[in-house]
Amino acid sequence: MENRDKKSILNRLALPEKELEELLDISFYKVIQKGDCFINAGEIPRKFAFITKGLFRYVYIHENGNEFTKSIITENNFVSSYSAMIYNSPSYFFIEALEEVEILEINYENWLELKEKNPFWNIFLLKIIEKAFSVKEKRERELLLLDAEKRYEIFVTEFPDLENRISQQIIASYLGIQPESLSRIKRKYKGLT
């Protein structure tokens, strides 16, 4: 990928020119195929990425094979196993591509050096972490307090195009229900709209 293409992508982050160049200098373009993982459970991650095209999911896989989709991460967001990365410990979840994904990958050591040189990046990181924390807090509340029908309604509102991009199995896993329950909820929901 040429620098001008990277620039158009990173402009989505609304970075000042100097910081844009700094981030371009430590990032590289990569394509991850559908079904492949950016980070595997058990791996100590030393990288994170900005998604320019495609979808990832954070997924826990129980030893019995059951999958639990923690999050779906869309374009123009960062993806990482952040706590594992900062604590130099194994990731508890997989970061799986749900379709072909294009990313700008950033090595964690290079990122730390960049933050040391320019305090702008600490403020930038704080904004990303605050956004991620807010999303996580909202998701936990929905899973704990709302019934499956309400969670589906929120999913359709927040991700209007995802039903055509990912499998019903993954949507059910994200909602914390069985696929059969999702089919029943969808029939009911479509009857109401």
Image (cartoon, rainbow, N blue to C red):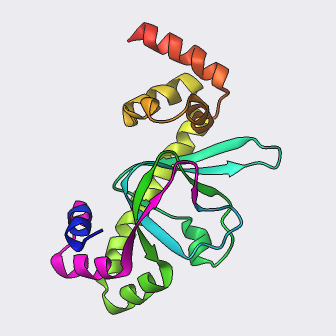
Using the image, determine if residue 152 lies above or below residue 46.
above
Where is residue 89 shown, x and y percent of the image? 67, 75
Give the position of the C terminus as an image quadrant: top left
Where is residue 157 shown, x and y percent of the image? 38, 31
Residue 26 horizontal side relative to residue 68, left or right:
left
- In reply to whether residue 41 is colored magenta, the answer given is no
Residue at image point 51% right, 53% down: 33
Q: Which residue is situated farthest in the top direction here?
A: 191
Camera sees residue 154: no
- In reply to whether residue 30 is colored magenta, the answer given is yes
Q: Which residue is situated farthest in the bottom direction here?
A: 117
Where is residue 123 shown, x and y percent of the image? 33, 75
Residue at image point 49% right, 79% down: 108
Using the image, determine if residue 28 lies above or below residue 129.
below
Q: Quadrant of residue 28?
A: bottom left
Give the position of the N terminus as an image quadrant: bottom left
Along the viewing direction, whichever of 124 and 182 lies nearer the viewer:
182
The range drawn in magenta is 10-37
Along the viewing direction, whichever of 157 and 7 lies nearer the viewer:
7
Camera sees residue 30: yes
- How many discs mark residues in the rendered view? 0
Q: Quadrant of residue 148?
A: top right
Q: Which residue is situated farthest in the left direction here?
A: 17
Residue 67 horizontal side relative to residue 118, left or right:
right
Q: Quadrant of residue 156?
A: top left
Where is residue 126 shown, x and y percent of the image? 38, 70
